[in-house]
Image (spheres, grey):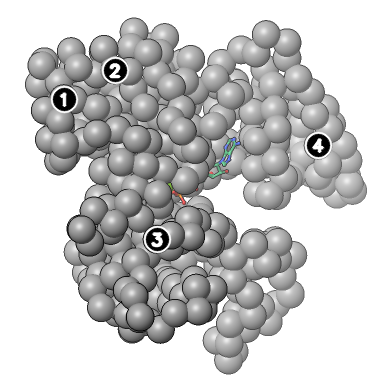
Amino acid sequence: MFDMDIGIDLGTANVLVYVKGRGIVINQPSVVAFEKKTKKLIAIGQKAKLMMGKEPENIEVIRPLRQGVISDYTVTERMLKAFIETAMQKKRMFGRPRICVCVPSGVTEVEKRAVVDAAYLTGAKHVDIMEEPIAAAIGSRIDISLPKGTMIVDIGGGTSDVAVISLGGIVESNSLKIAGDDYNEAIVKYIRRTYNLLIGEPTAERIKMTIGSVYPREEPVMMEVKGRDLVTGFPARIIVSSEETIEAFAEVTAQILDTIHNVLEISPPELVADIAEQGIILSGGGSLIYGLDKLVEESTGIRAYVGESALEAVVVGAGKSVNYSNK
Ligand SMILES: Nc1ncnc2c1ncn2[C@@H]1O[C@H](COP(=O)(O)OP(=O)(O)O)[C@@H](O)[C@H]1O
Ligand SMILES: [Mg+2]
């Protein structure tokens, strides 16, 4: 029997699980649905996310890791346990795994302890917590052991984390509780203000992913949006353009850019010189919004690019780090 090693990205929007030798076996939204009275689990992941905004009174659908902190401790534990158990079953192995978990940067020491305990409860032999920017860098194929500065900007659902890494450690960093989910909220507000139309968060997220932009496109794109007219109370539809989303997103985007500038300003000049040469690496789902790379580049004067598989970098990095420690 062999040991099975597992890397986990416990994100505010998505949980990913990487199993050594098998790759990513789980990639599901961090959403849980349960019955209110009995607290019985009804659905986890994608199935639960589809229930959002459509649930009857007796069912509660929650995202236990909103805004980069664990807002619901018990539900987070249950969700993590369920995902680890599924990942282990898929491998059909009974050895006790070594697990490496990445948690959002805003998570406190007490919450980290709870995550570690939950992972041990699934039968793990050893549990490590890894800092996300380090995992994101490893997952983006950066050799972090070198005495060379690398800047990683991870824009997740609830937090944007900017870090400068050198010699395997974080030199400077800053975390902002504003990220991908705030873009959704900005769209909801913009459409209500501009068109008197109320839309739900899933619709806002679809707009963001389809036409959402933070930088002008060569050709603007349009999308039809359905919601409820706030004046008549009836269903209504409008056409939204990508140019409008730039306006709707401006405030959120400005805060992310400010955080990047701030970390560049406080970083040692030698490392900033390295970053200028290597470029700024973007990761996380939020970095996939159209034009963010261009905008970061324009506002810093440093080349910026979305790293390889932005949504998977953290879990792959966590998985690989487990591999290293196993040699
Ligand atoms: N193609 C895309 N365009 C814009 N935003 C996206 C895209 N794909 C995912 N996102 C956004 O990325 C965020 C989730 O990113 P992720 O890195 O999984 O977050 P976390 O690490 O917090 O779980 C969500 O806000 C989601 O809407
Ligand atoms: Mg993340």
Front disc: 3 or 1? 3
Q: Type of residue at label 2?
A: Gln
- Give how far across and how far down residue 186 sits, in percent: 57, 36
Q: Which mark is residue 225?
A: 4
Q: Is residue 155 above or below residue 123?
A: above
Mark pair 4, 2: CA separation: 40 Å
For disc 2, the marked residue is: 278
For disc 1, the marked residue is: 148
Residue drawn at the location 54% of the way across and 32% of the way down? 288
Q: Is residue 80 above or below residue 11?
A: below
Q: Type of residue at label 4?
A: Val
Residue drawn at the location 32% of the way across and 61% of the way down? 101
Residue drawn at the location 64% of the way across and 67% of the way down? 48
Q: Quadrant of residue 113?
A: bottom left
For disc 3, the marked residue is: 20
Front disc: 3 or 2? 3
- Give how far across and how far down residue 278 sits, in percent: 29, 17
Mark pair 3, 1: CA separation: 28 Å
Mark pair 3, 2: CA separation: 29 Å
The residue tagged with tag 2: helix, strand or loop? helix
Q: Quadrant of residue 124?
A: bottom left
Q: Type of residue at label 3?
A: Lys
Q: Residues within 10 Å of mark 3 (few under 14, many from 20)?
A: some
Q: Earlier in the sequence, mark 3 or mark 2?
A: 3
Q: Earlier in the sequence, mark 4 or mark 2?
A: 4
